[in-house]
Image (cartoon, rainbow, N blue to C red):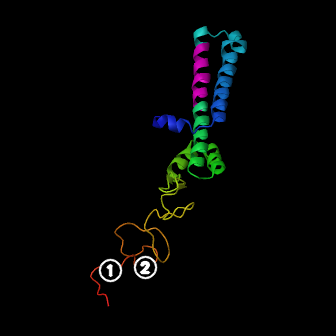
């Protein structure tokens, strides 16, 4: 499965249906307006009415469908990452000019990784698995916060992580 297919699978079916219905509604409404009905009596040439139809129906319907699908993606991706789906989706919808969507893409949490022992999803910043307690990264013996390889002291509390090399033992 390609990366695009994996990401496309995150868009809920409801968002796909809503996008299709919204697009078809716009096209049908503008088709009725410009290709039949009141615009026929204006005396505009047939080509001009088709031009108005394309500009006022096809382009907006594609943009509307794309917006609805991207909002659906925000919903699905926020759920996959363990974030607040409702909050991020509302921000994506109501912050204008797609700034809410851009903010989501910038501020979203990293994808959780599977625990090596129990396969439960675990955040990359954790030192231990919340499901089985397996050690994922080295941790400080004092504050239990994750540390990185090569550290001699904890970056959070300053405790020594391992005995200093060359120290005399009694």
* Residue 150 location (% of width, % of height): 34, 69
Q: Which residues are magenta?
A: 49-63
Look at 63% across and 11% down and name the residue there.
44
Of marks 2 and 1, which one's residue comes earlier in the chain? 2
Residue 62 included in the magenta stretch of the image: yes
Say what secondary structure mark 1 lies in.
Answer: loop
Residue 44 included in the magenta stretch of the image: no
Look at 50% across and 34% down and name the residue there.
5
Instruction: Work out which residue is located at the far bottom of the displayed protein and give it.
Output: 170
Q: Which residue is mark 1?
A: 164
Rendered position, 99 above or below 62: below
* Residue 156 location (% of width, % of height): 46, 74
Rendered position, 130 above or below 61: below
Look at 61% across and 39% down and name the residue there.
72
Instruction: Work out which residue is located at the far front of the displayed protein and give it.
Output: 117
**Residue 168 lies in what quarter of the image?**
bottom left
- Between the C-alphas of marks 2 and 1, the distance is 12 Å
């Amino acid at each position: 499965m390609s990366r695009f297919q994996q990401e496309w699978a995150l868009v809920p079916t409801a968002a796909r249906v809503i996008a299709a219905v919204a697009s078809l509604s716009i096209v049908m409404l503008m088709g009725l307006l410009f290709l039949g009905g009141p615009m026929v009596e204006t005396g505009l040439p047939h080509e001009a009415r088709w031009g108005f139809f394309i500009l006022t129906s096809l382009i907006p319907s594609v943009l509307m469908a794309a917006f609805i699908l991207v909002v659906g993606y925000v919903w699905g991706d926020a759920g996959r990452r363990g974030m607040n789906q409702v909050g991020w989706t509302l921000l994506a919808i109501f912050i204008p000019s797609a700034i809410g969507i851009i903010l989501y893409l910038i501020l979203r949490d990293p994808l959780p990784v599977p625990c090596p022992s129990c396969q439960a999803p675990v955040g990359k910043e954790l030192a231990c698995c919340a499901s089985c307690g397996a050690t994922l990264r080295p941790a400080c013996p004092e504050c239990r916060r994750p540390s990185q390889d090569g550290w001699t002291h904890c970056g959070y509390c300053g405790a020594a992580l391992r005995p200093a090399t060359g120290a005399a033992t009694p």
